[in-house]
Image (cartoon, rainbow, N blue to C red):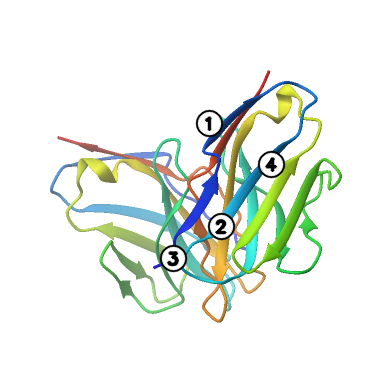
Amino acid sequence: GAVVSQHPSWVICKSGTSVKIECRSLDFQATTMFWYRQFPKQSLMLMATSNEGSKATYEQGVEKDKFLINHASLTLSTLTVTSAHPEDSSFYICSATKRGGQETQYFGPGTRLLVL
Amino acid sequence: DAKTTQPTSMDCAEGRAANLPCNHSTISGNEYVYWYRQIHSQGPQYIIHGLKNNETNEMASLIITEDRKSSTLILPHATLRDTAVYYCIAAGNNRKLIWGLGTSLAVNP
C-alpha cells in the first residue's frame, strides 16, 4: 500500500495566528514529500519539495519564512503557516514518494484551512 | 515538463467504458505519463502511469500511442464513484508534477 495521512483535515483560525499541518506516510518510508495548495476551482500548485533531513526547496513566489516546512523523519513532514491571513485560506495537500521505489507521488486527503 | 491537453468535461453512462484522452505532443523520451483523479474536496488519487508500453491495473488501462504524443485512460466499467476530475500529467525525473485543469468526468446513472 501507499497511504498518506494529513492532520488536521480542516482548521479554522484567527488572522495572525500560526497553523501547523502534519503529513505522514503510514505504511512506507518517504524519500521526498511535496506540499501543494489548491484554491477553489483551480488546479494544484506546488509550493515546496522537502527531503528528510534537509531544507525544503520552495517554488518561485512561495515565501519560505511564511510557510515553514520541517521534514524530521522519513514518515513525517509538517507545514506551518505563520501569521495566517484570510488570503491563505485554501486546501493544502501533501504527497510522498516511496524510498527505493519509482517516483510516483501518493497524496494525502488534504487539509482545508479557513482564516478569519 | 511537457504540457498536456485534455477535454474540459466528459459524460459516461454507468457500466460503460469511459475513455479519457490526453495529448502530450511535446513529451520527451524520459517523461512518464501519469494519471490521477480528484474527487471533490479530496486529495488526488494515483491511477496509473506508463512510459511507452500500455499498462493495466485494477483501476484502469492506459493506452499510449506509438509516437507517445497522446494517450487514453480507460475505465472499463464506470461507476458513479468514478465521477471526478481526471488529470493527465507528463513528468520526468525531476519528479515535479505540473497540474492542468483536467477532465471533469460525470458518470450518469
**Both on one chain, marks 3 and 2?**
yes
| Foreground disc of the pair 3, 2 | 2
Dot 3 corresponds to which residue?
A2
Asked whether the residues under marks 1 and 4 belong to the same chain, the reply is: yes
Q: Which residue is mark 2?
A: A24
Q: Earlier in the sequence, mark 4 or mark 3?
A: 3
> What label sits on residue A41 in the rendered view?
1
Q: Nearer the viewer, residue A111 or A17?
A: A17
What distance separates the C-alpha of mark 1 from that of mark 4?
A: 24 Å
Question: Percent x, y for residue B93?
Answer: 63, 74
Amino acid type indicated by mark 1:
Lys
Q: Tell me which chain the residue with mark 3 is part of.
A: A
> Label 1 to label 2, Cα distance in Å?
26 Å
Which of the two labelled residues, at mark 1 and mark 4, occupies the earlier sequence position?
4
Residue kind at label 2, given as amino acid type: Arg
Specify which label sits upstream in the sequence, 3 or 1: 3
Q: Which residue is mark 4?
A: A20
Task: In this rendered view, identify the residue nearer to me: A46 or B42.
Answer: B42
- Kind of residue at disc 3: Ala
Residue B32, x across and y down, in percent: 51, 71
The answer to whether residue B96 is seen in the rendering is: no
Q: State the SS at label 2.
A: strand
